[in-house]
Every structure is written in C-alpha cells, then in structure tokens.
Image (spheres, rainbow, N blue to C red):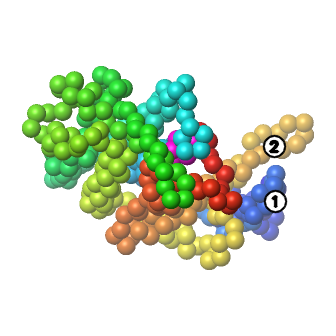
Amino acid sequence: MAHDALMTDGQEVRYALALIDFSDEDAVDREITLHEELTAEEYDEFASAYGKLRQALDDSLIEYLFSTLVEAERLASRVAATHVSDGIPLSRMDEIRRALLTTSLNFLSAVYMFKEHTKVRAIEAKDRALRDELLGKFNRLCETDPWVGLMLAVRHAVVHRTTAVISYRLDMQEASDGMVAFCNPVINRDAMANLKDAVAEGSEVQRLLQMFEQDPDLLVLMSDSFDSLEQFQLEIAPALESELRDAAFTVQLLAQRFPDDGDQDRLLLTHDLVHERDGHVHGQLPYVPLLPTVFSYAENLIEGEHAAPSRRGRPADPGVAVVYSAAPDTPERPTL
C-alpha cells in the first residue's frame, strides 16, 4: 500500500474515508483510494458510532446461538452420512459420542450465557422499570417455556454431574432408492432421573420429559429453544437498543458519504508513520473496515427493527437424515 494514497495537493491527509480493492484475491498489496478527507473530530465521531454498533452485533448471543445450532446439525448430518456409506465401527463409537456431546454442549452453554447476559444487562440498566421488565420477562420465559428450561437443566447436569445425560441414537433403514441413516443426539432420561435435583418436581420441564415415549431428540429441542430465545430477543430488543439509535444515525450518515456502487470495500483510514530506519520512513495505514452488516444494523435500528440472524447455511432437514441412492450421479459422501 503506497503512502501517496493519502496525499492531496502535496498535503498529508491523516484521517479519511477510503476505498480498498479486494477483487484480486492473489494480490499482496491492496490499492487504497482516498475518497474524502476527514477532520480529527469527524473521524472520532464516525469511529465511535461504528464501534458501538459493531460491538453490539459481536455481543449478540442470538448470533452465537444460531452458529452453535448449525454446527450441531451439520455434525449430526456428517455422522449419519458416514454411517450409511461406510458403517461406523465400534472402535469409533466413543469418539463420535464425544464429538456430539461437545457440539451439543456448545449450544447448551450458549443458552446459559444468554440467561446470564440478560440478567447482567438488566442489573446494569439505569432505568429500574426496564430492569424489572427484563428480569421478569426472562424469568417467565424459563417458567413457562419447557424447551428453554430443559436446556438449562441438561446443561447444569452435564457440567456439574455427569456427561451421560447426553447420548445419541443411530439408525439405518432401507428406502426405495437406497438407504437412509439417522443420527440423533438425545437426552438420556434414565441418567436425568438418577439426578434427583436436576429437574424440579412438578415443573414444566419434568412434565415435558415424562411426555416422551423415548429419549427426546436433542436437536429438535435445541431448534425449538432457539426459536423461543430469538422471539424473546425480538421482544426486548427495542428497550435494549434505544441507547444505540444516536450511533445508528451517525453510521447512516457515514454510509451516505460513500459512493453507491459496491465494487470496493469501505474503510475509515488514518495515516500513522511510525519511525525512521536506515534512512527510510517506515509507516502503516491503520484502518477500520466498514462491514455491510453494521450499516444494515444501523438501518434496522432507525426503522425500529432488530437484526435477526441469517438462516442461510442451515440444513433444510436439521441433521437427522442423509439418503444415498445407487444412481451413477450419487454425490461424494462426506466423512467425519
């Protein structure tokens, strides 16, 4: 990156809006084009507002919940694919159980983190009415929604008592055009029953467990829990995000100062020459990459909407079955 990209009429530019070209994936150096010079005050204002929204997105546990759910579904699909194509030897059963346990526990831990983050944000709220509203809503969710309550109970049992609470079920059946294999992480009801304090007597969670004729499919319950927590997040988002609206307006102004075409990525740029060595000035161009997701989030906040996670990449049939036929165009079968 050439330093003269930050020169206008021979004058050094210290703060700027800039464009960087990432179209050539093999390029070592990227071409930075100065778009508009900024004052130090403008740079600080834009960088601060952008940082607030980026941090809010990074801290979104709904996004984290979604990614851990997809990870669990994909692993279950890979196990099923391996089972139907090659079979799974007994020597690998413990390895597969550990993998399924790990990916399931990632989601369960994210549910617990969601609970803790909600409590902390409520406690830190300056408005006492908002604090009571957040705590009340989440407590009612845990009391009335058996899916979320069960996830918290299973997570507590696994972390504090025994990993035997999470098991898995493998099955393979003939179909008209080949074989279908199933892989289901499950909640081991016998293991839960042996932990007398894991589920409260007479609770919605206990009634839910008693309703199943076999060990409950954990992937289905995880998906239902995610839907409940996402809906809860949508309900409380306006109250939590009201303090971000000023930053959203500033970020929207920042977006409007760039050209409309999306051929290049956008940057907040500052010029920082560091020191001289061997008669040469060595410098760097620190920049803040301006992500499209943050601009979209700002727009949603202004319109009174919450940025829900993208559902792209999630298996259409969540990780429970893989079918292969004997046809010549059968796709390559994945392995673990």
> Is residue 173 visible in the rendered structure shown here?
yes
Residue drawn at x 62%, y 56% as measured from the top left:
326
Q: What secondary structure is found at the residue carrying circle 1? A: helix
Q: Position of residue 257 (x, y in %)?
A: 58, 73
Q: In the rendered view of the protein, which quadrant contains the C terminus?
A: top right
Is most of the magenta stretch helix, strand or loop? Answer: helix
- Between residues 198 and 94, which one lies in front from this camera angle? 94
259 on left or right of 208: right
Q: Position of residue 54 (x, y in %)?
A: 49, 54
Q: Position of residue 309 (x, y in %)?
A: 43, 59
- Between residues 246 and 142, which one lies in front from this camera angle? 142
Residue, far bottom: 260
Residue drawn at x 49%, y 70% as measured from the top left:
252
Residue drawn at x 34%, y 44% as measured from the top left:
217
233 on left or right of 284: left
| Mark 2, residue position | 282
Q: Is residue 81 magenta?
A: yes
- Between residues 247 and 145, which one lies in front from this camera angle? 145
Count neighbours of disc 1 (C-alpha within 10 A) and say few if under 14, some if 14 to 19, many if 20 or more: some
* Label 1, label 2: how far apart the Cα atoms are: 13 Å
Q: In the rendered view of the protein, which quadrant contains the N terminus?
A: bottom right
With respect to residue 134, does 275 lie above or below? above
Find the magenta span and give its range. Answer: 77-82
N-terminal label among 1 and 2: 1
Q: Amino acid at mark 2?
A: His
With respect to residue 53, does 272 lie above or below? above
| Mark 1, residue position | 4
Q: Position of residue 6 (x, y in %)?
A: 75, 60
